[in-house]
Amino acid sequence: MKKILRKEIKQRVSQISTFIPEYSSRICDLIIQSEVYKACRNLLLYMALPDEVNLSKLISQAICDKKNIYVPKVNIETRNMDFFQYTVYETMCTGAFGIIEPSVENLKYDSGNSSIKTLIIVPGRAFAFDGSRLGRGKGFYDSFLLKERQLLEDNVVFCGAGFSVQFLEALPLETHDIKMDLLVNEKGFVTKN
């Protein structure tokens, strides 16, 4: 079922490919204007693949706002994902799955200080109106988010970012799937059921 959904959503996104830059810009603006962004000190976000919401505008603003910005690096052998401080795009390299990643020499994100407000922008293949998220099937985000929820509790917010064509009424969920606290697409923040 999940494989079929991933394929269907990939097709939907391909049909709006010319609008991705415009929609991505709108989504970034919405996040930047949100109270949860203004309140956060740590901002964890992803480096977008061509069919995902491009967050470069958000990164630029977060640099101006002096947020602590971290982006993921995947270790395929250990099946682990860690976040490292974003410095400049030019110092990044292509890593696992063709995704732009930071150097391991950058400062590693540490959620040890649970009093710091943290916002995590999460990609997804699909989202549902109850906060459910369907990833690409590798499970890297679910295991990372589970640890963050346990460590930071109310001081972390998970925000799923996608295009409106990626939103469905419901998704098949498994016990390890982590729900988002907020959802956003180019039309605005999505009210959860």
Image (cartoon, rainbow, N blue to C red):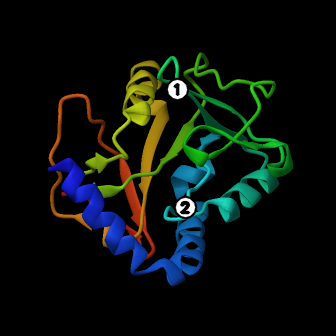
Marks 1 and 2 in Cβ contact (< 8 Å): no
- Residue at 61% across / 47% down in the picture? 99
Give coordinates of residue 106: x percent, y percent. 79, 28
Task: Indicate which label's residue lies in the foreground, 1 or 2.
Answer: 1
Q: Is residue 29 visible?
A: yes
Residue that carries the numbered disc 1 in the rendered image: 76
Left or right: 132 with respect to 103? Answer: left
The part of the image, by quadrant, that contains residue 129 is: bottom left
First along the sequence among labels 1 and 2: 2
- Identify the disc placed on residue 22: none
The CA span between labels 1 and 2 is 30 Å
Q: Amino acid at mark 1?
A: Ile
- Residue at 61% across / 62% down in the picture? 32
Q: Is residue 187 above or below residue 61?
A: below
Q: Is residue 96 above or below residue 192?
A: above
Give coordinates of residue 128: x percent, y percent. 24, 57
- Residue at 39% across / 52% down in the picture? 124
Q: Is residue 159 above or below residue 191?
A: above
Residue that carries the numbered disc 2 in the rendered image: 31
Left or right: 185 with respect to 128? Answer: right
- Residue at 25% across / 66% down in the picture? 8
| Residue closest to the eye, 8 or 60 | 8
Give coordinates of residue 182: x percent, y percent. 38, 52
Q: Amino acid at mark 2?
A: Ile
As helix, strand or loop, the secondary structure at mark 1 comes to loop
